[in-house]
Image (cartoon, rainbow, N blue to C red):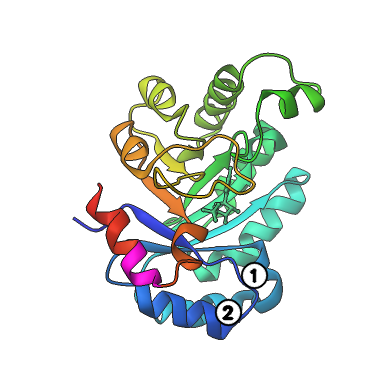
Amino acid sequence: MSSRVYVALDTPDLARAQALAAKVRHHVGGIKLGLEFFCANGPAGVRALEEVGLPVFLDLKLHDIPNTVAKAVQSLAPLAPAVLTVHAAGGRAMLEDAKAAAHPDTRVVAVTMLTSLDERDLADTGVAGSAHDHVLRLAELARAAGLDGIVCSGAEVRAAKAVWPDGFFVVPGVRPADGAVGDQKRVVTPRQAADDGASILVIGRPITQADDPDAAARAIAATL
Ligand SMILES: O=c1ccn([C@@H]2O[C@H](COP(=O)(O)O)[C@@H](O)[C@H]2O)c(=O)[nH]1
């Protein structure tokens, strides 16, 4: 079985992304490209990373009015990413239109509550209640809109999977037990994310900023 770890190649530098991907390719199951990479390199950069031969996850977290998101997803469809993200907070119509516009082979997943946020941040945005309840509410919205799954933290993935057994669950905010947390607030270990039902684990800096990214990816894979 291929690894459930997708490495987040968060860099604007195409050559660095290619070099990192080449180093870790035997110990990860896919590559995640986000806004930092896409804004600098665009679709041509994505095509260049496809050469590595791993599934590509395009983490653009689209969030706009339904028409704008649908047109953006339509423009991305020729890339046929394995996974594409939109924000659940965009609402049901936006989610439905995004799914309808996507390549049929693309899993469209909704970001529920960023792993860099905690409940105080949530309250600051006017949302009362727990992270758990907020994630489950948005998971239900994504499911009802016909999406393939959600992005949530490892703290919520078990509960989300219980109410959506065939959903696809993306878990970022993953840190080895002794790893630096950085700007992430809701973190779990790779093992916990896997045991609690993550379909894929997104891991960036613990791999990409390691002295030996291949060894770091291998060590993480060994814990799963
Ligand atoms: O809630 C979310 C959604 C997406 N991400 C992305 O995952 C990686 C995490 O990188 P690390 O270096 O392992 O922290 C990054 O690309 C984020 O944009 C997330 O962290 N949380």
Location of residue 146 in the rendering, given as x and y in whole percent from the top left corner:
50, 35
Q: In the image, is residue 127 above or below residue 154? A: above
The one of 175 and 10 positioned closer to us in this rendering: 175
Q: Is residue 197 above or below residue 35?
A: above
Q: Which residue is mark 1?
A: 38
Which of pointers 1 and 2 lies earlier in the amino acid sequence?
A: 1
| Residue 53 percent across, percent down from the top left | 34, 76
The residue positioned 45% from the left and 66% from the top of the image is 210
Q: In the image, what residue occupies the spot 60% across and 34% down?
A: 112
Up-down relation of residue 157 to residue 82 (above or below) = above
> Who is closer to the viewer here, 55 or 37?
37
Viewport quadrant of the N terminus: bottom left
Start and end of the magenta stretch? 212-216
For the point 50% across and 83% down, the residue is: 48
| Residue carrying label 2 | 45
Residue 204 seen from this side: no
The answer to whether 70 appears left or right of 85 in the picture is right
What amino acid is at disc 1? Phe
What x and y, as percent, mark residue 120?
73, 24
Task: Count neighbours of disc 2 (C-alpha within 10 A) and say few if under 14, some if 14 to 19, many if 20 or more.
Answer: many
The image quarter containing residue 164 is top left
Picture coordinates of residue 106, whole percent (x, y):
45, 55
Q: Secondary structure under badge 2?
A: helix
Judged from the image, the secondary structure of the residue bearing numbered disc 1 is: helix
